[in-house]
């Protein structure tokens, strides 16, 4: 991916261009633009006041660049010192190439969570996927991904998987349908490597995996996948995802219902020891 090089109008540096803008950058940029227009300033004149080029001002307003501290402070002074820009800049997050736009807020919360709970019935959770399985998923995506997008997706998932290693004090609990290991997405070799990878990933004592057997008579999560996490302050959040969309759930009553379903599902799934044994047997049959 190429980016245009933009020289500053005067010394003071440029803001860093984002390869994949986040929602917070777009929102911040819209606020800058609204305040600038309310003040009756053109981009050229505003750029002179903050000592950045017109092109940089435009890029910030469109959410294409991460504003640095100097830009925020100068823009605040030029636009009335209301405190709006200074305060909102604290909540800016970068977009991450390879992660769906609707998933990024959840991905940010994962990085500070003290507990993560995941139930999946569609595909093996991203935190447990092998590289071959990731590529098989991308190969089956419609419309087809470009080579650049495919590599960005794989790299983003590998980066996210570092959570399992870098956060040994966070508990990671997974419940996964047995059928996801039976379907052999990508072929027997990919499935064999996937199982090996999953067994290695769930070996640490802060990570548990439970398999939901295919022949179960009871199932508390027929409504679909569940993701839950506990924040450092003890509050809980949920996440729900479907085709082309995802939703962060903060309402306590809704999160409580998800918690109840997940807790019941844990009692219906195989124990962690039995789940590992099942995967080892499945691995031997490939």
Image: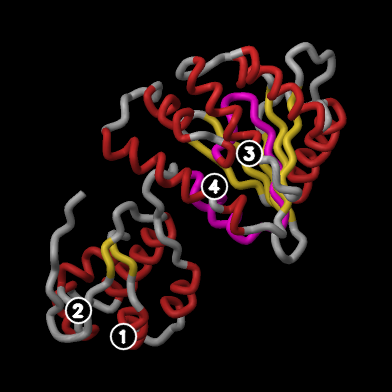
The image shows residue 207 at horizontal and vertical percentages of 71, 45
Q: Is residue 177 above or below residue 227?
A: above
Is residue 210 part of the magenta span, yes or no?
Answer: no
- In the picture, the disc for residue 200 is 3
Q: Nearer the viewer, residue 22 or 49?
A: 22
Q: Mark 4 and mark 2: span between their CA atoms?
A: 38 Å
Nearest to N terminus: mark 4 or mark 3: 4
Q: Quadrant of the C terminus?
A: top right
Quarter of the image where one finds residue 29: bottom left
Please give the residue where the numbered disc 4 appears in the rendered image.
161
SS at circle 3: helix
**Tag 4 or tag 1, which sits nearer the N-term?**
1
- Quickly name the residue at label 2: 52
Residue stretch rendered in magenta on the structure: 101-126
Observer-side mark, 4 or 3, equals: 3
Viewer-side residue, 239 vs 108: 108
* Measured Cα–Cα span from mark 1 to mark 4: 39 Å
Q: Is residue 95 left or right of residue 36?
A: right
Looking at the image, which residue is at 22% across and 75% down? Answer: 14
Q: What's the CA distance linking mark 3 and mark 1? A: 51 Å
Callout 2: 10 Å neighbours few (<14), some, many (20+)?
A: many
Kindly check if marks 4 and 3 are in contact, taking CB atoms under 8 A apart as contact.
no
Is 11 above or below relative to 61? below
């Amino acid at each position: 991916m190429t980016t245009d090089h933009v020289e500053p109008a005067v010394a003071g540096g440029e803001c860093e261009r984002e390869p994949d803008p986040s929602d917070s950058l777009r929102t911040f940029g819209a606020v800058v633009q609204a305040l600038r227009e309310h003040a009756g300033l053109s981009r050229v004149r505003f750029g002179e006041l903050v000592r950045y080029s017109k092109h940089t001002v435009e890029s910030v307003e469109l959410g294409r660049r991460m504003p640095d501290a100097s830009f925020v402070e100068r823009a605040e002074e030029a636009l009335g010192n209301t405190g709006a820009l200074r305060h909102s800049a604290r909540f800016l997050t970068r977009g991450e190439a390879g992660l769906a736009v609707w998933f990024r807020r959840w991905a940010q919360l994962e990085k500070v969570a003290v507990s993560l709970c995941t139930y999946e019935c569609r595909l093996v959770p991203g935190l447990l996927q092998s590289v071959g399985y990731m590529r098989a998923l991308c190969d089956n995506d419609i419309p087809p991904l470009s080579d650049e997008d495919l590599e960005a997706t794989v790299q983003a998932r590998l980066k996210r998987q570092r959570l399992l290693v870098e956060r040994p004090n966070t508990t990671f609990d997974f419940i996964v349908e047995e059928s996801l290991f039976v379907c052999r997405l990508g072929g027997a070799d990919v499935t064999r490597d996937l199982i090996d990878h999953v067994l290695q990933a769930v070996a640490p004592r802060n990570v548990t995996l439970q398999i939901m057997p295919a022949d179960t008579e009871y199932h508390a999560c027929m409504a679909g996948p569940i993701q839950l996490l506990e924040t450092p302050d003890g509050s809980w959040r949920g996440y729900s995802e479907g085709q082309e969309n995802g939703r962060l759930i903060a309402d306590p009553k809704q999160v409580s219902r998800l918690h109840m379903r997940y807790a019941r599902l844990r009692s219906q799934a195989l124990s962690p020891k039995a789940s590992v044994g099942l995967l080892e047997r499945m691995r031997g049959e490939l």
